[in-house]
Image (tube, rainbow, N blue to C red):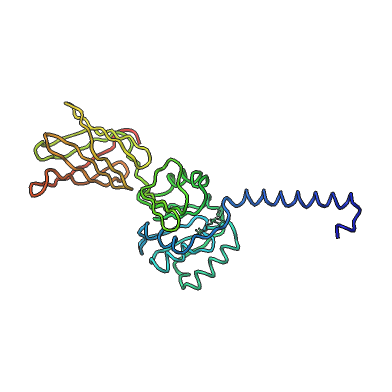
Amino acid sequence: MIAYLPSAVAASMRVFFVCAILAAQQAWAQYFDVPYVPTPQVVVDEMLRLAQVGPDDFVIDLGCGDGRIPVTAAAFFGARALGIDIDPGRIAESHRNAKAAGVTGRVEFRQGDLFQLDIAKASVVTLYLLPDINVKLRPRLFELLKPGTRVVSHDFSMGDWKPDRVLTVQKKIYFWTMPARVAGRWKLEADLPGVGASTYELEIRQSFQEIEPFARTEKRNYAVWEPRLRGKSISFIIVDNDLAHRFEGTVEGNAIEGVVRTGAGTAEVQTAFRAARIGGS
Ligand SMILES: C[S@@+](CC[C@H](N)C(=O)[O-])C[C@H]1O[C@@H](n2cnc3c(N)ncnc32)[C@H](O)[C@@H]1O
C-alpha cells in the first residue's frame, strides 16, 4: 500500500514505523531484563539435585518462563515452589504446566518484576538470568535471604562471589549457600582438654563465605587453621598446648554454639563451646 502513496508520505510513514519498532524494542529491553530461553529439562533436574531440594523446601524461580523449575521441584522433589515472570503469557503457560503435572496445590505463579518480589521465605532460589542481572540481584539476595538458603544459577556466575560448587552437565550450573554474617569480634569460651577453661578473642574478617579468623588470649596470639563457613555452619582449628582443638558450631545472629573435638582417634575428647559477638557485625 505504501508503494501507491506519494513518495514523501511513504518515506515519512517508513520513518514512523522504524521509530515505532525501535521504541518498542527499547521499551521491551527496559521491561524484560532477560529474554525467554528455557532451561533444558536435564539441567533443571541437575540444578534441583545440586541444591538437594526436598519436601521441606520452598523453591523460588526468579524469571520462571514456562514454570518448568517450580513444577519439577513440586512434582519430583516434593517441594513447594513459587515462580515469578514479567511476561503474562509465560505465567499462563506456567499455570497450564502445573495443572498438567497435577501440582497446582504446591506451586504458585505470579506475574511481576523479580526485583520487587519478597524472597525471604525461600530456602532455594533458582536463576537463569544474565551475568549482569545476577550481579544486580546479588545485594537483594544478601539483604533478604536467610543464611543457609541455597542459590543455583544456570549458565551464569555472580561476579566476584565465588560459587561453592560448579557442575557441568550439558550446561554450567553454579551453586552457593548464603553465608551467615560473622565478621567482627567474638568472645569465645571453652573448657579445653589439656588447656583448661579458656577465653579467646576471635576476630573474623569476611568476604562472602570466605573467612579469615585470628585468635588471641591475654597472653598470646594464635593462628586459626582451616577456617570454613557454609551457611550457618562454621568450623576452624586452634592449636593450643600442642593439641589441635577442632571447633564446629552453628551461627545464630550474635551467638555461635557448638562442639570442640580435641585429640585424635580413641584419645579424642568432645566438649562444648560458645561465642558471643562483642563488636562489628
Ligand atoms: C532465560 S528465561 C528462564 C526461564 C526459566 N527460569 C527457565 O530456566 O527455564 C528468563 C525469564 O525471565 C523473565 N524476565 C525477564 N525480566 C524479568 C523481570 N524483571 N522480572 C521477572 N521476570 C523477568 C523472562 O520473561 C523469561 O521468561
Q: Position of residue 53 (x, y in %)?
A: 37, 60
| Among the 4 quarters of the image, the one containing residue 278 | top left
Left/right placement of residue 256 relative to residue 53 reads left
Check the image and report above or below for 249 versus 99: above
Ligand 1 position by quadrant:
bottom right
| Among the 4 quarters of the image, the one containing residue 210 | top left
Check the image and report above or below for 273 versus 106: above
Q: Position of residue 213 (x, y in %)?
A: 27, 35
Name the residue at 51% across, 52% down: 129
Check the image and report above or below for 24 versus 279: below
Left/right placement of residue 276 relative to residue 271 reads right
Left/right placement of residue 209 relative to residue 172 reads left
Position of the N terminus by quadrant: bottom right
Of 71 and 108, nearer the camera is 71
The outermost residue toward the top is 219
Position of the C terminus by quadrant: top left
Name the residue at 28% across, 47% down: 233
Q: Position of residue 84 (x, y in %)?
A: 52, 58
Left/right placement of residue 69 relative to residue 93 reads left
The outermost residue toward the right is 6
Name the residue at 62% across, 51% down: 31
